[in-house]
Protein backbone atom coordinates (compact mmCIF):
# COMPACT_ATOMS: atom_id res chain seq x y z
CA UNK A 1 0.00 0.00 0.00
CA UNK A 2 1.25 3.48 -0.86
CA UNK A 3 2.57 5.52 2.07
CA UNK A 4 0.31 8.44 1.13
CA UNK A 5 -2.69 8.73 -1.17
CA UNK A 6 -1.25 11.33 -3.53
CA UNK A 7 -0.01 10.58 -7.04
CA UNK A 8 2.17 13.03 -8.94
CA UNK A 9 1.33 12.98 -12.65
CA UNK A 10 3.39 14.52 -15.46
CA UNK A 11 1.05 16.00 -18.08
CA UNK A 12 2.38 16.43 -21.64
CA UNK A 13 -0.49 17.75 -23.79
CA UNK A 14 1.67 17.92 -26.95
CA UNK A 15 0.44 19.14 -30.35
CA UNK A 16 -2.67 19.22 -32.54
CA UNK A 17 -5.66 17.69 -30.81
CA UNK A 18 -3.43 16.54 -27.90
CA UNK A 19 -4.33 19.53 -25.67
CA UNK A 20 -7.98 19.34 -26.83
CA UNK A 21 -8.41 15.76 -25.57
CA UNK A 22 -6.20 16.28 -22.51
CA UNK A 23 -8.51 18.95 -21.04
CA UNK A 24 -11.57 16.62 -20.72
CA UNK A 25 -9.37 13.82 -19.32
CA UNK A 26 -8.10 16.23 -16.63
CA UNK A 27 -11.72 17.20 -15.84
CA UNK A 28 -12.68 13.54 -15.45
CA UNK A 29 -9.67 12.90 -13.17
CA UNK A 30 -10.59 15.96 -11.10
CA UNK A 31 -14.12 14.62 -10.73
CA UNK A 32 -13.03 11.16 -9.55
CA UNK A 33 -10.54 12.79 -7.18
CA UNK A 34 -13.33 14.89 -5.68
CA UNK A 35 -15.60 11.86 -5.27
CA UNK A 36 -13.17 9.12 -4.19
CA UNK A 37 -11.83 8.84 -0.67
CA UNK A 38 -8.06 8.55 -0.24
CA UNK A 39 -7.15 9.49 -3.79
CA UNK A 40 -5.28 12.71 -4.59
CA UNK A 41 -3.46 13.95 -7.68
CA UNK A 42 -0.78 16.54 -8.24
CA UNK A 43 -0.41 17.47 -11.90
CA UNK A 44 2.67 19.12 -13.40
CA UNK A 45 2.39 20.16 -17.03
CA UNK A 46 5.46 20.16 -19.27
CA UNK A 47 6.25 20.93 -22.91
CA UNK A 48 7.05 18.33 -25.59
CA UNK A 49 6.36 18.03 -29.29
CA UNK A 50 6.59 19.70 -32.66
CA UNK A 51 5.36 23.12 -31.49
CA UNK A 52 8.06 23.21 -28.81
CA UNK A 53 10.66 22.09 -31.36
CA UNK A 54 9.68 24.95 -33.68
CA UNK A 55 10.01 27.46 -30.84
CA UNK A 56 13.15 26.16 -29.15
CA UNK A 57 14.84 23.61 -31.41
CA UNK A 58 14.16 20.83 -28.86
CA UNK A 59 11.23 18.41 -29.03
CA UNK A 60 11.73 16.75 -25.64
CA UNK A 61 13.53 19.15 -23.25
CA UNK A 62 15.69 17.81 -20.47
CA UNK A 63 13.46 19.25 -17.66
CA UNK A 64 10.48 17.39 -19.15
CA UNK A 65 12.43 14.12 -19.14
CA UNK A 66 13.48 14.75 -15.53
CA UNK A 67 9.88 15.47 -14.52
CA UNK A 68 8.75 12.22 -16.18
CA UNK A 69 11.47 10.37 -14.28
CA UNK A 70 10.34 11.77 -10.91
CA UNK A 71 6.55 11.46 -11.27
CA UNK A 72 4.37 8.41 -10.59
CA UNK A 73 2.98 8.31 -14.14
CA UNK A 74 3.01 10.22 -17.43
CA UNK A 75 -0.14 11.34 -19.23
CA UNK A 76 0.47 12.34 -22.85
CA UNK A 77 -1.90 13.83 -25.45
CA UNK A 78 -0.29 13.43 -28.87
CA UNK A 79 2.86 14.82 -30.47
CA UNK A 80 4.07 15.68 -33.96
CA UNK A 81 2.84 17.79 -36.88
CA UNK A 82 3.42 16.80 -40.51
CA UNK A 83 4.76 20.22 -41.58
CA UNK A 84 7.33 20.44 -38.74
CA UNK A 85 10.14 17.96 -39.22
CA UNK A 86 13.76 17.27 -38.33
CA UNK A 87 16.31 18.24 -40.99
CA UNK A 88 16.44 14.58 -42.20
CA UNK A 89 12.71 14.75 -43.02
CA UNK A 90 11.46 12.52 -40.18
CA UNK A 91 8.59 13.61 -37.92
CA UNK A 92 8.96 14.89 -34.37
CA UNK A 93 8.01 11.96 -32.11
CA UNK A 94 8.93 12.49 -28.43
CA UNK A 95 6.37 9.81 -27.54
CA UNK A 96 8.63 7.28 -29.28
CA UNK A 97 11.75 8.75 -27.61
CA UNK A 98 10.10 8.33 -24.17
CA UNK A 99 9.66 4.61 -24.89
CA UNK A 100 13.39 4.26 -25.45
CA UNK A 101 14.47 6.51 -22.56
CA UNK A 102 12.30 4.72 -19.97
CA UNK A 103 12.47 1.25 -21.56
CA UNK A 104 8.70 1.08 -22.01
CA UNK A 105 8.69 -2.23 -23.82
CA UNK A 106 5.00 -3.18 -23.49
CA UNK A 107 2.59 -1.09 -25.59
CA UNK A 108 -0.83 -2.12 -24.30
CA UNK A 109 -3.66 -1.33 -26.73
CA UNK A 110 -7.09 -2.55 -25.68
CA UNK A 111 -9.91 -2.62 -28.23
CA UNK A 112 -13.32 -3.02 -26.62
CA UNK A 113 -16.52 -2.27 -28.51
CA UNK A 114 -18.59 -0.03 -26.24
CA UNK A 115 -22.37 -0.40 -26.04
CA UNK A 116 -24.12 1.33 -28.95
CA UNK A 117 -20.92 2.15 -30.85
CA UNK A 118 -21.08 1.12 -34.54
CA UNK A 119 -18.44 -1.35 -35.75
CA UNK A 120 -17.75 -2.03 -39.44
CA UNK A 121 -17.77 -5.75 -38.60
CA UNK A 122 -21.07 -7.58 -39.18
CA UNK A 123 -22.17 -9.33 -36.00
CA UNK A 124 -19.86 -7.34 -33.71
CA UNK A 125 -22.72 -5.72 -31.78
CA UNK A 126 -24.09 -9.18 -30.88
CA UNK A 127 -20.82 -11.04 -30.33
CA UNK A 128 -18.80 -8.20 -28.84
CA UNK A 129 -15.15 -7.22 -29.30
CA UNK A 130 -12.86 -7.20 -26.28
CA UNK A 131 -9.21 -7.81 -27.06
CA UNK A 132 -5.80 -6.34 -26.28
CA UNK A 133 -2.88 -5.92 -28.67
CA UNK A 134 0.47 -5.78 -26.90
CA UNK A 135 2.99 -4.08 -29.14
CA UNK A 136 6.65 -4.42 -28.23
CA UNK A 137 7.69 -0.76 -28.19
CA UNK A 138 11.48 -0.44 -27.90
CA UNK A 139 12.96 -2.64 -30.61
CA UNK A 140 11.74 -4.63 -33.64
CA UNK A 141 11.92 -2.52 -36.80
CA UNK A 142 11.78 0.68 -34.71
CA UNK A 143 15.26 -0.15 -33.34
CA UNK A 144 16.41 1.22 -36.67
CA UNK A 145 14.84 4.63 -36.08
CA UNK A 146 17.33 7.31 -37.14
CA UNK A 147 19.84 4.61 -38.20
CA UNK A 148 18.51 3.65 -41.62
CA UNK A 149 21.00 3.77 -44.47
CA UNK A 150 19.90 5.24 -47.78
CA UNK A 151 22.07 5.49 -50.87
CA UNK A 152 21.07 6.39 -54.40
CA UNK A 153 20.57 2.69 -55.14
CA UNK A 154 19.07 1.22 -51.99
CA UNK A 155 17.74 1.70 -48.47
CA UNK A 156 18.22 -0.54 -45.45
CA UNK A 157 16.65 -0.70 -41.99
CA UNK A 158 17.46 -3.46 -39.49
CA UNK A 159 14.95 -5.25 -37.26
CA UNK A 160 16.14 -6.25 -33.78
CA UNK A 161 14.64 -8.86 -31.44
CA UNK A 162 16.44 -9.42 -28.12
CA UNK A 163 16.02 -12.20 -25.60
CA UNK A 164 16.00 -9.77 -22.67
CA UNK A 165 13.14 -7.59 -23.96
CA UNK A 166 11.16 -10.47 -25.47
CA UNK A 167 11.18 -12.46 -22.23
CA UNK A 168 9.92 -9.49 -20.23
CA UNK A 169 7.35 -8.70 -22.93
CA UNK A 170 6.00 -12.27 -22.95
CA UNK A 171 5.92 -12.52 -19.16
CA UNK A 172 4.00 -9.22 -19.05
CA UNK A 173 1.59 -10.50 -21.74
CA UNK A 174 0.96 -13.84 -20.01
CA UNK A 175 0.33 -12.02 -16.71
CA UNK A 176 -2.14 -9.67 -18.43
CA UNK A 177 -3.99 -12.60 -20.03
CA UNK A 178 -4.11 -14.35 -16.64
CA UNK A 179 -5.44 -11.20 -14.99
CA UNK A 180 -8.16 -10.89 -17.64
CA UNK A 181 -8.99 -14.58 -17.12
CA UNK A 182 -9.49 -13.91 -13.41
CA UNK A 183 -11.99 -11.21 -14.43
CA UNK A 184 -13.90 -13.54 -16.79
CA UNK A 185 -11.61 -13.43 -19.86
CA UNK A 186 -10.63 -16.41 -22.01
CA UNK A 187 -7.04 -16.73 -20.79
CA UNK A 188 -5.61 -16.92 -24.30
CA UNK A 189 -2.46 -15.30 -25.72
CA UNK A 190 -1.61 -15.23 -29.44
CA UNK A 191 1.99 -14.69 -30.52
CA UNK A 192 1.73 -12.81 -33.84
CA UNK A 193 4.80 -13.13 -36.06
CA UNK A 194 6.23 -14.16 -39.42
CA UNK A 195 8.20 -17.13 -38.12
CA UNK A 196 7.75 -19.05 -41.39
CA UNK A 197 9.93 -16.57 -43.31
CA UNK A 198 12.27 -14.70 -40.97
CA UNK A 199 14.79 -16.16 -38.52
CA UNK A 200 14.28 -13.18 -36.19
CA UNK A 201 10.60 -14.11 -35.87
CA UNK A 202 11.39 -17.81 -35.41
CA UNK A 203 13.56 -16.66 -32.48
CA UNK A 204 10.68 -14.46 -31.21
CA UNK A 205 8.33 -17.48 -31.34
CA UNK A 206 10.87 -19.78 -29.68
CA UNK A 207 11.19 -17.33 -26.75
CA UNK A 208 7.38 -17.11 -26.55
CA UNK A 209 7.14 -20.91 -26.27
CA UNK A 210 9.82 -20.96 -23.56
CA UNK A 211 7.94 -18.37 -21.47
CA UNK A 212 4.57 -20.08 -22.13
CA UNK A 213 5.79 -23.06 -20.15
CA UNK A 214 6.05 -20.80 -17.08
CA UNK A 215 2.42 -19.62 -17.36
CA UNK A 216 0.27 -22.77 -17.59
CA UNK A 217 -2.91 -20.88 -16.63
CA UNK A 218 -2.92 -19.18 -20.07
CA UNK A 219 -3.42 -20.98 -23.41
CA UNK A 220 -0.62 -20.00 -25.82
CA UNK A 221 -1.43 -19.70 -29.55
CA UNK A 222 0.60 -18.94 -32.68
CA UNK A 223 -0.59 -16.99 -35.70
CA UNK A 224 1.18 -15.34 -38.65
CA UNK A 225 0.70 -11.60 -39.04
CA UNK A 226 -1.02 -11.90 -42.43
CA UNK A 227 -3.50 -14.56 -41.28
CA UNK A 228 -4.05 -12.57 -38.09
CA UNK A 229 -5.02 -9.45 -40.05
CA UNK A 230 -7.67 -11.40 -41.96
CA UNK A 231 -8.96 -13.14 -38.85
CA UNK A 232 -9.25 -9.86 -36.94
CA UNK A 233 -11.67 -8.41 -39.49
CA UNK A 234 -13.62 -11.66 -39.89
CA UNK A 235 -13.94 -12.82 -36.28
CA UNK A 236 -12.38 -10.38 -33.81
CA UNK A 237 -14.38 -11.98 -30.97
CA UNK A 238 -12.12 -15.07 -31.20
CA UNK A 239 -9.16 -13.10 -29.82
CA UNK A 240 -8.25 -12.23 -26.24
CA UNK A 241 -4.64 -10.96 -25.92
CA UNK A 242 -2.18 -10.71 -28.83
CA UNK A 243 1.53 -9.96 -28.50
CA UNK A 244 3.69 -8.86 -31.40
CA UNK A 245 6.72 -6.98 -32.71
CA UNK A 246 6.81 -3.17 -32.77
CA UNK A 247 5.99 -2.47 -36.43
CA UNK A 248 3.38 -5.24 -36.69
CA UNK A 249 1.79 -3.92 -33.47
CA UNK A 250 1.79 -0.36 -34.80
CA UNK A 251 -0.31 -1.49 -37.76
CA UNK A 252 -2.48 -4.09 -36.02
CA UNK A 253 -3.48 -1.68 -33.24
CA UNK A 254 -4.73 0.90 -35.79
CA UNK A 255 -6.71 -1.92 -37.39
CA UNK A 256 -8.25 -2.95 -34.04
CA UNK A 257 -9.05 0.73 -33.29
CA UNK A 258 -10.97 0.78 -36.58
CA UNK A 259 -12.99 -2.24 -35.40
CA UNK A 260 -14.30 -0.37 -32.36
CA UNK A 261 -15.37 2.94 -33.90
CA UNK A 262 -12.13 4.74 -34.71
CA UNK A 263 -8.90 6.13 -33.33
CA UNK A 264 -10.73 8.33 -30.84
CA UNK A 265 -12.05 5.23 -29.07
CA UNK A 266 -8.71 3.43 -28.57
CA UNK A 267 -6.68 4.06 -25.39
CA UNK A 268 -3.14 2.87 -24.81
CA UNK A 269 -0.34 2.52 -22.28
CA UNK A 270 3.40 2.13 -22.80
CA UNK A 271 4.62 0.22 -19.79
CA UNK A 272 8.09 -0.61 -18.50
CA UNK A 273 9.37 -2.06 -15.24
CA UNK A 274 9.31 1.33 -13.46
CA UNK A 275 7.65 3.94 -15.63
CA UNK A 276 4.61 4.18 -17.86
CA UNK A 277 3.13 6.63 -20.37
CA UNK A 278 -0.62 6.73 -20.97
CA UNK A 279 -1.86 8.23 -24.22
CA UNK A 280 -4.54 7.60 -26.83
CA UNK A 281 -3.58 5.39 -29.81
CA UNK A 282 -4.24 8.28 -32.16
CA UNK A 283 -1.87 10.98 -33.33
CA UNK A 284 -2.36 14.75 -33.44
CA UNK A 285 -5.05 14.60 -36.19
CA UNK A 286 -4.09 17.91 -37.87
CA UNK A 287 -7.09 17.57 -40.21
CA UNK A 288 -9.52 18.19 -37.33
CA UNK A 289 -7.46 20.26 -34.86
CA UNK A 290 -9.07 23.45 -33.59
CA UNK A 291 -12.54 22.42 -34.73
CA UNK A 292 -13.83 21.17 -31.38
CA UNK A 293 -14.71 17.75 -32.79
CA UNK A 294 -11.84 15.56 -31.52
CA UNK A 295 -13.21 12.56 -29.66
CA UNK A 296 -11.64 12.56 -26.16
CA UNK A 297 -12.86 9.05 -25.25
CA UNK A 298 -9.50 7.38 -25.95
CA UNK A 299 -7.70 9.93 -23.78
CA UNK A 300 -10.23 9.51 -20.96
CA UNK A 301 -9.91 5.71 -21.13
CA UNK A 302 -6.10 6.08 -21.15
CA UNK A 303 -6.42 8.03 -17.88
CA UNK A 304 -8.45 5.10 -16.50
CA UNK A 305 -5.67 2.71 -17.57
CA UNK A 306 -3.23 4.95 -15.70
CA UNK A 307 -5.27 4.63 -12.51
CA UNK A 308 -5.46 0.86 -12.92
CA UNK A 309 -1.67 0.67 -13.34
CA UNK A 310 -1.06 2.93 -10.33
CA UNK A 311 -3.46 0.79 -8.27
CA UNK A 312 -1.61 -2.35 -9.21
CA UNK A 313 1.85 -0.92 -8.74
CA UNK A 314 1.14 0.73 -5.38
CA UNK A 315 -1.47 -1.72 -4.09
CA UNK A 316 -3.89 1.18 -3.86
CA UNK A 317 -7.56 0.03 -4.14
CA UNK A 318 -9.07 3.56 -4.38
CA UNK A 319 -7.21 4.11 -7.66
CA UNK A 320 -8.59 0.80 -9.03
CA UNK A 321 -12.07 1.80 -7.95
CA UNK A 322 -11.69 5.19 -9.70
CA UNK A 323 -10.49 3.45 -12.90
CA UNK A 324 -13.54 1.17 -12.89
CA UNK A 325 -15.84 4.14 -12.28
CA UNK A 326 -14.44 6.00 -15.30
CA UNK A 327 -14.85 2.97 -17.56
CA UNK A 328 -18.40 2.40 -16.35
CA UNK A 329 -19.27 6.08 -16.87
CA UNK A 330 -17.92 5.99 -20.44
CA UNK A 331 -19.92 2.79 -21.13
CA UNK A 332 -23.07 4.36 -19.70
CA UNK A 333 -22.68 7.57 -21.72
CA UNK A 334 -22.39 5.57 -24.96
CA UNK A 335 -25.21 3.19 -24.02
CA UNK A 336 -27.36 6.30 -23.43
CA UNK A 337 -26.79 7.52 -26.99
CA UNK A 338 -23.53 9.52 -27.01
CA UNK A 339 -22.36 9.69 -30.67
CA UNK A 340 -19.06 11.50 -31.37
CA UNK A 341 -18.61 13.38 -34.64
CA UNK A 342 -15.85 10.84 -35.40
CA UNK A 343 -18.44 8.27 -36.45
CA UNK A 344 -21.08 10.56 -37.85
CA UNK A 345 -22.79 11.69 -34.65
CA UNK A 346 -23.49 15.22 -33.42
CA UNK A 347 -21.23 15.17 -30.33
CA UNK A 348 -18.02 17.20 -30.36
CA UNK A 349 -15.28 17.23 -27.73
CA UNK A 350 -17.22 19.28 -25.15
CA UNK A 351 -20.39 17.18 -25.54
CA UNK A 352 -18.48 13.92 -25.02
CA UNK A 353 -16.80 15.35 -21.91
CA UNK A 354 -20.14 16.60 -20.56
CA UNK A 355 -21.84 13.21 -21.08
CA UNK A 356 -19.02 11.29 -19.36
CA UNK A 357 -18.95 13.74 -16.43
CA UNK A 358 -22.75 13.47 -16.08
CA UNK A 359 -22.51 9.65 -16.06
CA UNK A 360 -19.78 9.87 -13.39
CA UNK A 361 -22.15 11.76 -11.15
P1 LIG B 1 0.38 9.17 -36.09
O1 LIG B 1 1.31 8.89 -37.24
O2 LIG B 1 0.96 10.02 -35.03
O3 LIG B 1 -0.28 7.92 -35.56
P2 LIG B 1 -1.60 9.94 -38.03
O4 LIG B 1 -1.55 11.29 -38.70
O5 LIG B 1 -1.22 8.73 -38.80
O6 LIG B 1 -0.80 10.05 -36.66
P3 LIG B 1 -3.98 10.32 -36.53
O7 LIG B 1 -3.51 11.65 -36.09
O8 LIG B 1 -4.26 9.33 -35.48
O9 LIG B 1 -3.02 9.63 -37.56
O10 LIG B 1 -5.28 10.52 -37.42
C1 LIG B 1 -5.78 9.50 -38.29
C2 LIG B 1 -7.22 9.84 -38.64
O11 LIG B 1 -8.03 9.60 -37.50
C3 LIG B 1 -7.43 11.30 -39.01
O12 LIG B 1 -8.38 11.41 -40.03
C4 LIG B 1 -7.96 11.91 -37.74
O13 LIG B 1 -8.80 13.02 -37.94
C5 LIG B 1 -8.72 10.78 -37.09
N1 LIG B 1 -8.64 10.88 -35.63
C6 LIG B 1 -7.58 10.60 -34.86
N2 LIG B 1 -7.84 10.83 -33.58
C7 LIG B 1 -9.12 11.27 -33.51
C8 LIG B 1 -9.98 11.67 -32.45
N3 LIG B 1 -9.58 11.67 -31.18
N4 LIG B 1 -11.23 12.07 -32.76
C9 LIG B 1 -11.65 12.07 -34.03
N5 LIG B 1 -10.91 11.69 -35.07
C10 LIG B 1 -9.64 11.29 -34.83
Image: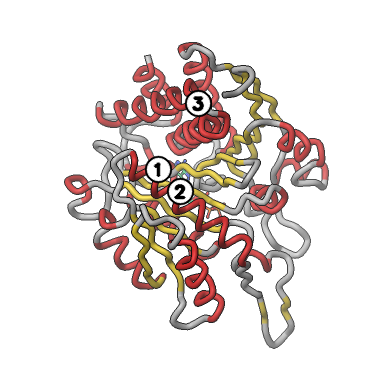
Residue at point 51% right, 42% down? 280
Q: Quadrant of residue 220?
A: bottom left
Q: CA distance from mark 2 to mark 1?
A: 6 Å
- Left or right: where does residue 340 sit relative to residue 247? left
* Whole-percent x, y for residue 198 in the image: 52, 81
Which part of the image, by quadrant, shows the N terminus? top right
Whether pointer 2 and pointer 1 mark residues with C-beta atoms closer than 8 Å, the reply is: yes
Give the residue at mark 2.
Answer: 175
Give the residue at mark 3.
Answer: 24
Above or below, 195 relative to 283: below
Circle nearer the N terminus (3, 1): 3
Q: Quick one: 176 or 123, which is closer to the camera?
A: 176
Circle nearer the N terminus (2, 3): 3
Residue at point 54% right, 17% down? 39
Above or below, 221 relative to 57: below
Callout 3: helix, strand or loop? helix
| Mark sitting on residue 179 | 1
Which part of the image, by quadrant, shows the C terminus? top left
Q: Quadrant of residue 77?
A: top right
Amino acid sequence: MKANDSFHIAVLPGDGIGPEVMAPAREVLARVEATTQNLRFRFTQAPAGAGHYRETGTALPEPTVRLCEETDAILLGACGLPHIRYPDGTEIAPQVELRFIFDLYAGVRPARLLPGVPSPIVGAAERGIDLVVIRESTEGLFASMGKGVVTHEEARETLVITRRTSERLFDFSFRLAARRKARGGRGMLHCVDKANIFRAFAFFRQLFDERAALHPEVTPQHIYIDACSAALVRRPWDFDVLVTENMFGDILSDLTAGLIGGMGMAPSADIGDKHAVFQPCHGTAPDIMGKGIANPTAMILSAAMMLDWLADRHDHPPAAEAAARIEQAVDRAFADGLRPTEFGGPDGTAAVAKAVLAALG
